[in-house]
Amino acid sequence: MMRQFELVERVKSYDPTADEDAINRAYVFAMKQHGSQLRASGDPYFSHPIEVAGILTKYKMDAASIITALLHDTIEDTPATVADITKMFGAEVSRLVDGVTKLSRIELQSDQSKQAENFRKLVLAMSEDIRVLLVKLADRLHNMRTLHYIRNPDKRRRIALETMEIYAPLAERIGISEVKNELEDLAFAELHPDVRGSLVARLNFLREKGGDLISRILDELRKILKEADVDASVSGREKTPYSIWRKMQLKNVAFEQLSDIMAFRVLVGSVEDCYRALGVIHSHYPMVPNRFKDYISTPKPNGYRSLHTGVFGPERHRIEVQIRTQDMHEVSELGVAAHWSYKQGMRPADDGKQYRWLRELLDIMEHASNPEEFLEHTKLEMFQDQVFCFTPKGDLIALPRGACPVDFAYAVHSAVGDTCVGAKVNGRMMPLRTPLNNGDQIEIITSKAQTPNPTWERFVVTGRARARIRRFIRTQQRGQYIDLGRAILNRAFKQEGYEFTEKALDGVLKIFKAASVEDLVVSVGEGGLTGREVVSAVYPELKTSQQKAQHNPDNVVALKRAKAKPQTPAMPIRGLMAGMAMHFAGCCHPLPGDRIVGIVTTGKGVTIHTIDCDSLEQFAETPERWLDLAWNQAPDDGEMHIGRISLVVGNEAGNLGSLSVVIAKNLGNISNLKVTNRNADFFEMIIDVEVRDVKHLTNIIAALRATPSINSVERARN
């Protein structure tokens, strides 16, 4: 365990102005408060905060951070209070300690909501002061180093999984690669011990087989750079087992195919020397295809800058070479801590880009409906590899791999994403679901009339975009469910001879575990409750009379008839608000002119079917879910609907073109086409056609039947 004077000397070595007295007082205060507490290893508990403080000295953190590390468990695990900390060490330290304390023990719980809520608190705390995260990362690092002392294997696994899913990505985000690598490898050892053991064994074999291979490669790299008059410091290392395993997974390659099991670092004096060194290395060794990355001209969002290249180096070994200046290297190793200014007492320099990810997490948190959704989106955001795209003005936007123009639009600004109607990728109009590539220049086209499209959620990959879209859908649908729920309740109350009032629902909120009358109405609109259930709860005597009627032999026949034939009270579409939570069934594709019914479906509102749809049989025993609907007889407003047809077409050149021409001449538009069977003579296919109504579709079918190349055509019902 580090002694008091050793800790002070470490801090003073890089910050001579540090408050030595405050560090000493914090050391003694924490030791007294923790007293005889022990860790799982049997060591005094106080050894933990000392080690956490020692980790932070490696990253040259300021005195307030060191004191916070010493005190970070006192409020939670000892009688000390926030007031005590404020009185003895001042407001800044008190705020930092409180920020760390509020996180409680963020161990991965079987209760997902607790973990998610704690992670939400972490984001809030570090948004106020990033030093809270730095202390928490050091705390987690020491806990992972001593994880093997915990006897419960399930608990060890939970902690390791959380480290891999949350803390390692956060360490990467703030650029502390050394902490990130160690956290990943320690978690990997717990989660996949057999895999890690196998990789370590293979690395040991290569090391023994190659003897002093790394030193030989180092000597040759130093020699060629010196001969080219490039003043450089060269070092080499093996990659960690986890980083090797992850690349094997991502690239789907064998161990032997990896080019960067051995990595070599070249440190030079200037940016110009970086590119000179790169030229020297490429002129001596063949480059491995697709292994060059320039993070100097295009830095990572966490500020990381370097040149990466893979080459068939000395002795024809595949190696990775990283080339950077000393300043770049310091940022790579220390991340956000490298920007701290001690003499001036300032916060780290923030150019607005390095902390963009943190603002995005806060934005996701604002729009997520619950902590679990927030955790889902942030995991999604932090784990994916990135692509770098540009705005028309040349500003850089970093996105997860697989992102599309909608993700880009939301990354620019939430309002841009909400009103996005199209996108130009490198000057060409492209679909909004187009995956983006490194270097793409994106121009987003917007319209004030546009709102987020629910279908976007199927292809966006960033948590920020998904959270905004989901929030819009929830807000829109809630209003629709309220209107639909009121209509259903109004009808149900009238059937029993009562007038519906929302005041009548106040007395039954507890029965249905609803927080408010509006929540209860929404539940009815969503299909979670039926109108009859609510009426029976408001008027219990109805339920008693219904039970008596069921035991009356004279009513048995009438009840059976009621179950056999659904009662469909009138509720025409024109009576619902425009855009109400309602959609057309994909099984029968109802069109204006069809006789239709509605089925109240949980989570979807009303699903509209044609009266002869086979799917209706499954709802025969729940007549309360049926709505008798009719198409609005208002003058045609030009709205188009999807009609589905099945065809058999001769397999001859030009027949598909003839089919398209016939549909177009009859003012239809093909929205989807699927070939279901093909042989030497015929194509069998399903086509979705945009039409105005049943009559319009009938005209198209008739025209197709008159076309010689089409053998048969029918309206499809599936």
Image (tube, helix red, strand yellow):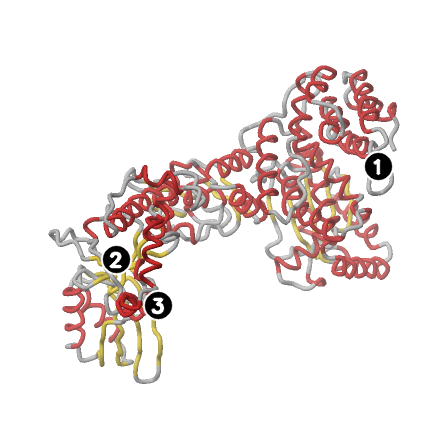
- The answer to which of 348 and 43 lies nearer the viewer is 43
Instruction: Decide if residue 275 is on the left or right side of residue 314.
Output: left
Q: Which residue is mark 1?
A: 38
Q: Residue at x 49, y 46 (%)?
A: 462
**Nearer the camera: disc 2 or disc 1:** 2
Q: Which residue is mark 2?
A: 627
Question: x and y percent of residue 57 in the render?
Answer: 78, 29
For marks 3 and 2, the one nearer the N-term is 3
Q: Can you see residue 290?
A: yes
For marks 2 and 1, the one nearer the N-term is 1
Q: Is residue 368 above or below residue 642?
A: above
**Nearer the camera: disc 1 or disc 3:** 3
How much space separates mark 3 and mark 2, taking CA atoms?
Answer: 15 Å
- The answer to which of 643 and 430 lies nearer the viewer is 643
Q: Name which residue type carries label 2.
A: Leu
Q: Secondary structure at mark 2?
A: strand
Q: Is residue 710 above or below residue 17?
A: below
Q: Secondary structure at mark 1?
A: loop
Res 681 → quadrant: bottom left
For marks 1 and 3, the one nearer the N-term is 1
The quarter of the rendered structure image containing the N terminus is top right
- The answer to which of 147 and 614 lies nearer the viewer is 614
How much space separates mark 1 and mark 3, taking CA atoms?
Answer: 62 Å
Q: Name which residue type carries label 3.
A: Gln
Question: x and y percent of residue 305 in the render?
Answer: 63, 38
Q: Is residue 376 above or below residue 623?
A: above
